[in-house]
Image (cartoon, rainbow, N blue to C red):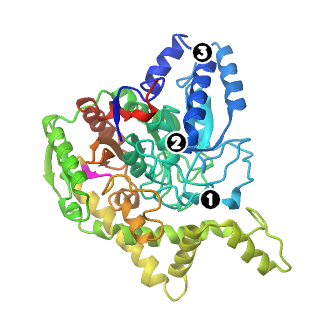
Amino acid sequence: MTRAQGPAGPWTSAATLRRALARREISAREACEAALARLHAGEPRVHAFLSTSDERALARAEVLDRMRVQGPLHGVPIALKDNIAVAGMRTTAGSKMLDSYVSPFDATVTRRLEEAGAVVVGKTVCDEFAMGSSTENCAFGPARNPWALDRAPGGTSGGSTAAVAAGFVPLALGSDTGGSIRQPAAFCGVVGLKPTYGRVSRHGLIAFASSLDQIGPIARTTADAAFMLELIGGADPEDATAARRAVPPLAGALPGSAKGLRVGVPRHLISSGIEPAVGARFDDALGELVRLGAKVSTIELRNSHLGIAVYYIVATAEASANLARYDGVRYGRRAQAATLAEMYDRTRATGFGPEVKRRIMLGTYVLSAGYHDAYYVKAQQVRALIRDDYARAFESVDLVALPTAPEGAFRLGARTADPLAMYLSDVFTVGASLAGLPAVSVPAGFTDEGLPVGLQLIGRAWDEATIIGVADAFERATPWASEHPAQFSEA
């Protein structure tokens, strides 16, 4: 697991490529060709993509080259998680249930990025219906971690983070329900940003848990992630949960600073169950924040230790409701059968994978008449307490710091027989999701085995600017963002 300094691809960042395109040092078609060449050379080893769109991407790049006015992402190749709709492209959500579905419309985030001049080169591997922590639940095979090909890239947005880490594209979108952007970003050594719930439209995102799902950017640098969030955020008449709030000029406020900011650390949450090397890197990161002028103190999030239990009740309940539409009549594939009931059974038995079936069963159970109050209602009550804990913490601190994940990337196959062990990968990320808060994972060093470690920063609702500023300051003061897997370095 060797590391190399400098860019893991033809560009150090999307910002560097944008400048080269604006100066016409490179054409949009040349940028697209370079990305596709690198993608196809490395893809057999990584399997970051479920589908690519070479002809569509090259045709769009040629159109952009003929345009006199350039958008802010003019000619920049990007990848989208395969639960985000792109008109005319296959969109499967990693499931056999949707293996032949071609979207007739663009998600709002897709439209906004293409209006800004981005070029979609493909759709990335994800756990089926965004349920998992390793991409191993994808019906079409898992992605692999570019740092160690026998390791998981994390999930459910592992394909997007692997694509960025391997240098196939400088930018990608993922979706985060309980940590599905941040955890794989930590495993792959890139930046992953989960916005405040409601900051980004979910129109065109295939739903898993509607009160938790949020689309967010994945990038090589914090500045690129901030810039991408500016472009995709904001109100949307197609989505009632998208807040009517203007997105502040996040990228324009950089470079960021940590000076004078108060950082809270819930030490009780990381007192056990964490890999020693991850704990050491986290302490190193806190020391760096102090050197940058931040004030670090211990806080208590009294109910956050219940986060995993609450999350897997609320999320499975919402999944049960959302996935009921895939019955062979309204949506999804249809199995042949003699009766309607048999058709329902066969459709769902062959269309859904084991993890999706497990979560539907759990969700249906906690919503059933005899258990609704004991489980679902109680979980929502504890969710409110977790939200209140963060609100109290933010009376005395400006942001909360945690490791992104309790360990480095685990081996593929190591957790598939133990769902609970897999669920615990999200132990440090579910709290921000349940509370609807913005959070970012930024590279913070390596384990003893040479696997990336992430620092997670959680902010107040709608205050992405603070966590982005601190993440940017930390990134510029440390060498971790400039390191990449040597096996995907430039020849």
Q: Residue at x 78, y 80 (%)?
A: 342
The CA span between labels 1 and 2 is 20 Å
Q: Which mark is residue 27?
A: 3
User: In front: mark 3 or mark 1?
Assistant: 1
Relative to 377, is 328 on the left or the right?
right
Residue, disc 1: 139
Residue, disc 2: 173
Relative to 491, is 81 on the left or the right?
right
Number of marks drawn: 3
The part of the chain drawn in magenta is 400-404
- The image quarter containing residue 5 is top left
Above-or-below relation of 309 to 219: below
Task: Identify the amino acid type marked 2.
Answer: Leu
Could you tell which of marks 3 and 1 lies nearer the N-terminus? 3
Q: Residue at x 68, y 60 (%)?
A: 96
Dominant SS type (magenta) = strand
The answer to whether residue 406 is seen in the rendering is yes
User: In front: mark 1 or mark 2?
Assistant: 1
Task: Identify the amino acid type marked 1.
Answer: Ala
Task: Identify the amino acid type marked 3.
Answer: Ser
